[in-house]
Amino acid sequence: MLVLLVLSLLSPPMAAASKDKGGAVLEVLYLGNDYVQDPESGAWIDYNHFIIEALESSRSMEVNVEFRWPGEKGYVSTELSFDPYDVVIFSEVWSSHFTEGQIADLVSFVEDGGGFIMFGGFGGFGGRDEYGEWGGTPIEDILPVEITSNEDAVDEDTEMVYVHKQRDHPLLHGVNLNDAPVLHGYNDVEASGAGTVIAVNSANDAPLLTVGEYGEGRVVAFASNPAGGWGVDFVEWNKYDRFLTNMVSWAANIPERK
């Protein structure tokens, strides 16, 4: 699922951010490493494009996504500036990909009003092996869930189950979770008093989709992966685009344009 040996040729070119935060276009920085190895051919398949295309094809608002792959050495030798963006997304990137300064800058970005979304996987939340390991970092402090283990990735099918009183939450506008495909894995996180759980894991009632605030900013924790191996069926959902757009528009605190 996670790859350090993916050739840089697989990485889409970086697009320069051209809009100021709060402009007409919702600007998203997507830091992603969603590659899956085909068991038969051994080739690495790029799943990042599902997330990027879903957001940029939104019919409810205009979204511009800048994608950055961590490469073999992570982002430690890369200059990351979060200020031009409304929302930052982590998908299958782990703590060792970043410097302490980059992590501190992201925390400040959220505290000052930026949006942050973490997707799960081997590199999300606690993760697996040397991947992930966000427990005990400043990023865990801004998440609306608790990471109880840095080995919390579970390869087990699950479905999203509504928390009844959250059926009308903006993240679910135009979306029926009862129609969502099975997810093939999850991170076994726990609810915290700082978050609002919108959907739980059908396998164990643990939080699967949780939102919260940190300072002036908003944070979304999706404890599975909407692409990659865990989301291989999820990307076929006819509400996939809307679901992801709801996430970024809520995180950016920007009402959708109908």
Image (tube, rainbow, N blue to C red):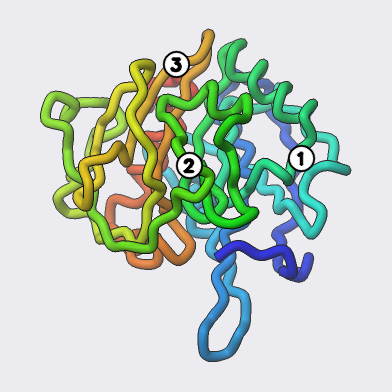
Which residue corresponds to mark 3? 213
Q: Quadrant of residue 130?
A: bottom right
Q: Residue 11 appears at what percent x and percent y?
A: 71, 61
Q: Nearer the viewer, residue 233 or 186?
A: 186
Q: Earlier in the sequence, mark 3 or mark 1?
A: 1
Name the amino acid type tagged 3.
Answer: Glu
- The N terminus sits in image quarter: bottom right
Against 100, residue 155 (above or below) is below
Q: Quadrant of residue 254?
A: top left
**Left-right relation of 84 to 125:** right
On residue 149, which mark appears?
2
Asked if residue 27 shows in the view, the reply is yes
Say if mark 3 contacts mark 1, CB within 8 Å.
no
Near mark 1 (Cα within 10 A), the count class, few <14, some 14-19 or many ≥20, is few
Q: Earlier in the sequence, mark 2 or mark 3?
A: 2
SS for callout 1:
loop
**Left-right relation of 2 to 230:** right
Say which residue appears at 18% left-offset and 44% top-offset: 161
Which residue corresponds to mark 1? 16
Q: CA separation, marks 2 and 3?
A: 23 Å
Q: Earlier in the sequence, mark 1 or mark 2?
A: 1
- The C terminus sits in image quarter: top left
Against 28, residue 211 (above or below) is above
On residue 109, which mark appears?
none
Near mark 2 (Cα within 10 A), the count class, few <14, some 14-19 or many ≥20, is some
